[in-house]
Image: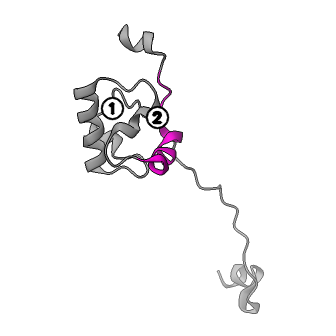
Amino acid sequence: MTAWWYRQGGADGRLIEIDREPPRTARFLVDVNQADWPELAQLPGIGQTLAQRIVTSRQERGPFLDHSELRRVRGIGPKTLEKMRPYLRPIPPAADVAGR
C-alpha cells in the first residue's frame, strides 16, 4: 500500500487524477391537464400550494389549452411560467383535448 501511495504522488502533494462520469440530471415532462398536485409540485417554482391551485383551476375551468393559460392560476406569473416551461409536456390542439 505504501508503494502505491508513493507512486501516486506520495508526500510531494501532487493531485491524483480520477476519471469520473459527468453527473446525470433527471428530466421529466408533466402533463398539466392530467397530473395530480404531488407531481406538479415537483416543477421548479411550484410548491404544494400552487400545485393545488393548478388542479383546482383545471377542475373548475376546464383543461389548459396552452401553457400560457397557466397564468390564470393565482401566483403564476411570467417568471414562474418560464421556469416551468422546459418541464411541461406539449398540449395537443384544442380539438384533440375535446375529443378525449
Name the residue at 34% across, 24% down.
Answer: 63
**Residue 35 circle label:** 1
Report the front residue among 34 and 59: 59
Position of 19 compared to 43: left or right? Answer: right
Magenta residues, start to end: 77-91
Q: Secondary structure at mark 2?
A: helix
**Residue 68 circle label:** 2
Colour convention: one colour
Q: Amino acid at mark 1?
A: Ala
Q: Where residue 45 sits: x, y (%)?
A: 41, 52
Q: Is residue 26 above or below residue 8?
A: above
Is disc 1 surrounded by few (<14), some (14 to 19) or many (20+) residues within 10 Å? Answer: some
Q: Assign the C terminus to one quadrant of the image.
A: top left
Report the front residue among 51 and 25: 51
Is disc 2 surrounded by few (<14), some (14 to 19) or many (20+) residues within 10 Å? Answer: some
Image quarter of residue 39: top left
Q: Secondary structure at mark 1?
A: loop
Position of 99 compared to 28: left or right? Answer: left
Could you tell me how far apart the alpha carbons at marks 1 and 2 are, in whole angstroms? 17 Å
Name the residue at 27% across, 33% down.
Answer: 57
Q: Amino acid at mark 2?
A: Ser
Principal SS element in the magenta part?
Answer: helix
Name the residue at 41% across, 29% down.
Answer: 31
Q: Is residue 20 above or below residue 86?
A: below
N-terminal label among 1 and 2: 1
Q: Is residue 19 above or below residue 91?
A: below
